[in-house]
């Protein structure tokens, strides 16, 4: 499964894209954000205006790391699970969730490898390491409040009740024209973590 496949079959099917500030109906998606000009302005954490069991696919690109997480890591993981449970309720049985977040493993590996110039490494897979950690804004919702690697995100998805959780490599997951055009921050962070999960029947 990949994002190109989702686009191919998008028309006439309820597909939800979270965290995109542009209208996406022309390609069969329904965008939600609290800023800009999405199809609907709403908090992606709650999705109160979206019916349960109504979506075949949800794409959350550079969204999950931005919510107002508080407390220690375990508390932030607990809230992540709660958000994922909300998204799962909106999916139909066998619906797919696609998540893109900055890759915590890549951030750490890049920091260690380029420790003598980590503040100026735009030519590396991580691009702007500081931006990947903190985001590019100075206040909510533009800064990052959580960092995930695959193991943390997989744990959260499992606890939320998802199945068939897998990491998508760049060759399978990157429809860069789609991601960059509608959500530039998806590429600003360099090599991102892309994960697919399924809501069971």
Image (cartoon, rainbow, N blue to C red):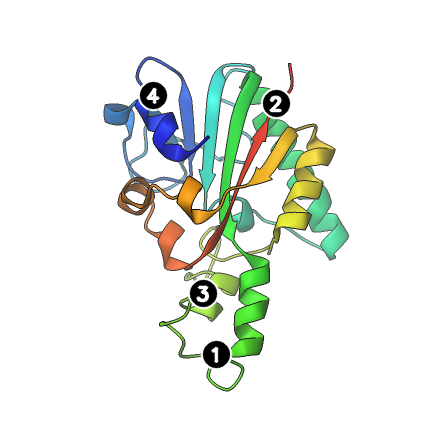
Decide: few, some or many residues near mark 4? Use Cα within 10 Å; few <14, some 14-19, many ≥20.
some
Q: Is residue 44 above or below residue 200?
A: below
Work out whether residue 47 can be spotted: no
Q: Which residue is mark 4?
A: 10
- Category of crowding for the residue at label 1, using alpha-carbon neighbours closer than 10 angstroms: few (below 14), some (14–19), many (at least 20): some
Task: Find residue 199 and name its label.
Answer: 2
Q: Which of 60/83 is in front?
A: 60
The answer for how far apart the CA atoms under marks 1 and 2 are is: 39 Å
Lower sequence index among marks 4 and 1: 4
Q: Position of residue 73 (x, y in %)?
A: 72, 55
Label 1 secondary element: loop
Alpha-carbon span between mark 3 and mark 4 = 31 Å
CA–CA distance between discs 2 and 3?
Answer: 31 Å
Marks 3 and 4, the one that precedes in the sequence = 4
Element at badge 3? loop
Sequence-first disc among 1 and 3: 1
- At horizontal 47% and vertical 58% (from top left) the residue drawn is 139
**Residue occupied by mark 1:** 118
Q: Position of residue 119 (x, y in %)?
A: 45, 79
Residue 98 appearing in the image = yes
Name the outermost residue toward the left: 26
Q: Position of residue 97 (x, y in %)?
A: 53, 30
Which residue is found at the position 50% from the left and 86% from the top?
116
């Amino acid at each position: 499964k990949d994002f190109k496949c989702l686009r191919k079959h998008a028309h006439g099917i309820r597909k939800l894209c979270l965290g995109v500030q542009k209208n996406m109906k022309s390609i069969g998606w329904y965008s939600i954000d609290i800023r800009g000009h999405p199809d609907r302005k709403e908090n992606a954490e709650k999705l109160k205006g979206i019916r349960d069991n109504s979506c075949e696919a949800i794409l959350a690109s550079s969204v999950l790391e931005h919510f107002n997480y508080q407390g220690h890591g375990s508390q932030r993981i607990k809230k992540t699970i709660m958000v994922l449970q909300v998204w799962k309720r909106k999916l139909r049985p066998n619906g797919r969730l696609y998540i893109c977040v900055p890759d915590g493993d890549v951030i750490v590996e890049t920091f260690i490898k380029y420790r003598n110039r980590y503040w100026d490494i735009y030519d590396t897979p991580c691009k702007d390491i500081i931006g990947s950690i903190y985001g590019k804004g100075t206040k909510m919702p533009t800064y990052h409040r959580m960092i995930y690697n695959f193991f943390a995100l997989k744990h959260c998805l499992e606890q939320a009740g998802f199945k068939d959780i897998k990491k998508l490599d760049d060759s399978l997951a990157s429809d860069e024209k789609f991601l960059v055009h509608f959500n530039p921050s998806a590429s600003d962070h360099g090599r991102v973590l892309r994960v697919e999960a399924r809501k069971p029947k």
